Amino acid sequence: MNTTYITLGVVLLLICIVLYYVFFMAKEDFYKYTKDNLYTVPWQWEWKKKDIINLECHCPTCNEVLVYENDYLLHKTYFLCPSCDSQKAVIGGGDSKYAFGIVRREINRKIRTKEYKELIPKV
């Protein structure tokens, strides 16, 4: 009778440990999703917990980090390559804060819909 309770206790403890690992310790795989082509240019970023940090867009020709210029009259942000001396992308609707916000929302949408899984390297 006593060994039954001990065995049951050990089994329940092991089940609790496995469930804890599965729900709390398993690292989410979206942290591997750190680059994508959005709005005609490649973007790269890092993760800090669940926040996107160091979001940058790059020139598709030379991989230089693009700079941006706001057109407040037309509510557009132009992304320009200083090396190629050309415009590489335009995001309409607002200034650069708005443009970077749209990119962040698109990244989060791909995470919600699991589309990012097709874009991360397979191990």
Image (spheres, rainbow, N blue to C red):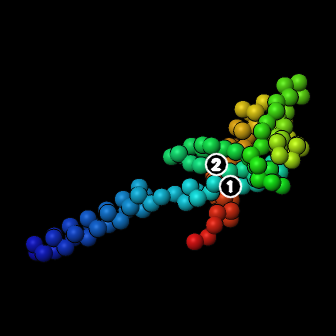
Q: Is residue 5 left or right of residue 45?
A: left
Indicate the position of residue 11 as horizontal and vertical percent values.
26, 70
Q: Quadrant of the C terminus?
A: bottom right
Please, what secondary structure does the residue beneath circle 1 have? strand
Indicate the position of residue 65 as horizontal and vertical percent values.
74, 46
Mark number displayed over residue 112:
none
- Dots 2, 1 in contact, CB < 8 A: yes
* Residue found 31% across the figure and 62% down from its top: 16
Q: Is residue 2 left or right of residue 112?
A: left
Q: Quadrant of residue 20?
A: bottom left
* Residue found 77% across the figure and 53% down from its top: 63
In the rendered image, which residue does mark 2 sit on? Answer: 45
* Residue found 80% across the figure and 50% down from its top: 59
Three-letter code, disc 1: Lys
Foreground pick, 40 / 22:
40
Q: Quadrant of the N terminus?
A: bottom left
Mark 2 is surrounded, within 10 Å at the Cα level, by few (under 14), some (14 to 19) or many (20 or more) other residues, namely some
Q: Is residue 65 left or right of residue 49?
A: right
In the rendered image, which residue does mark 1 sit on? Answer: 35
Indicate the position of residue 4 as horizontal and vertical percent values.
16, 74
Task: Give me the C-alpha separation between circle 2 and circle 1.
Answer: 6 Å
* Residue found 56% across the figure and 55% down from its top: 31
Three-letter code, disc 2: Trp
Mark 1 is surrounded, within 10 Å at the Cα level, by few (under 14), some (14 to 19) or many (20 or more) other residues, namely some
Indicate the position of residue 91 as horizontal and vertical percent values.
83, 39
- Label whose residue precedes the other's in the sequence (2 or 1): 1
Q: Using the rendered image of the protein, determine whether residue 119 is visible from the camera's viewpoint.
A: yes
Q: Using the rendered image of the protein, determine whether residue 109 is visible from the camera's viewpoint.
A: no
Foreground pick, 66 / 7:
66
Please, what secondary structure does the residue beneath circle 2 have? strand
In the rendered image of this protein, does residue 19 appear above or below residue 55?
below
